[in-house]
Image (cartoon, grey):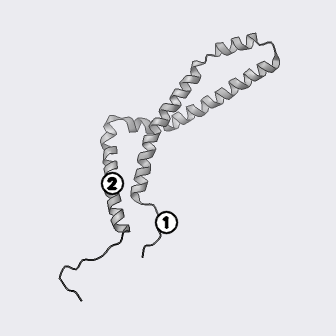
């Protein structure tokens, strides 16, 4: 009779950690790229836009646009900073062997868990067939 498991298998936890490390690298790169794209927009360009807009409603729209872009930029910058240390640790060549060993550990641990969670039986060794 199989019992319902409420705790997670160690292999799942290790696999989640490996996924976190892999995704942090992509997250970091994507966010840094977005921040760089926002930084390409020069304040002097916005100042010239303000200079040539005569309507206060249009100036207000431009101000709101700039404000929203700065909020988005901050969001991406914070996300990049949150992922930076993980991404750099994962991409460091010296740590590659560590992550390869963890990946192998997941496979070996899953085999053990499948055996323990599966249907098991005992093969008699002494030949006693009572």
State the residue at coordinates (42%, 41%): 22
Say which residue appears at 33% left-offset and 66% top-offset. 115
Instruction: Tell me where residue 83 appears, x and y as whole percent.
Output: 49, 38
Q: Quadrant of the C terminus?
A: bottom left
Q: Is residue 126 above or below residue 17?
A: below
Q: Which residue sits furthest right?
A: 56
Q: Which mark is residue 90?
A: none
Badge 1: residue crowd in 10 Å (few <14, some 14–19, many ≥20): few
Q: Is residue 113 above or below residue 121?
A: above
The residue that mark 1 highlights is: 6
- Give whichever of 56, 121 is nearer the camera: 121
Query: Disc 2 or disc 1, which is closer to the eye?
Result: 2
Q: Based on the displayed image, in which of its 4 quarters is residue 8 positioned? A: bottom left
In terms of image quadrants, where is residue 119? bottom left
Q: Position of residue 123 (x, y in %)?
A: 24, 77
Q: In terms of sequence position, does the residue under pointer 2 or pointer 1 come before the other?
A: 1
Residue picked out by circle 2:
107
Residue at the image point whose x is 42% and y is 76% from the top: 1
SS at badge 1 = loop
């Amino acid at each position: 009779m199989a019992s319902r498991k409420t705790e997670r298998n160690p292999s799942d936890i290790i696999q989640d950690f490996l996924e976190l490390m892999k995704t942090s690298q992509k997250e970091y790169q994507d966010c840094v790229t977005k921040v760089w794209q926002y930084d390409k927009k020069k304040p002097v360009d916005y100042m010239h836009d303000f200079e040539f807009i005569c309507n206060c409603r249009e100036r207000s729209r431009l101000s709101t646009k700039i404000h929203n872009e700065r909020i988005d930029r901050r969001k991406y910058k914070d996300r990049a900073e949150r992922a930076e240390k993980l991404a750099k640790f994962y991409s460091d060549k010296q740590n590659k062997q560590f992550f390869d060993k963890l990946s192998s550990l997941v496979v070996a641990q899953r085999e053990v868990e499948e055996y323990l969670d599966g249907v098991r039986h005992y093969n008699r060794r002494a030949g006693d067939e009572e």
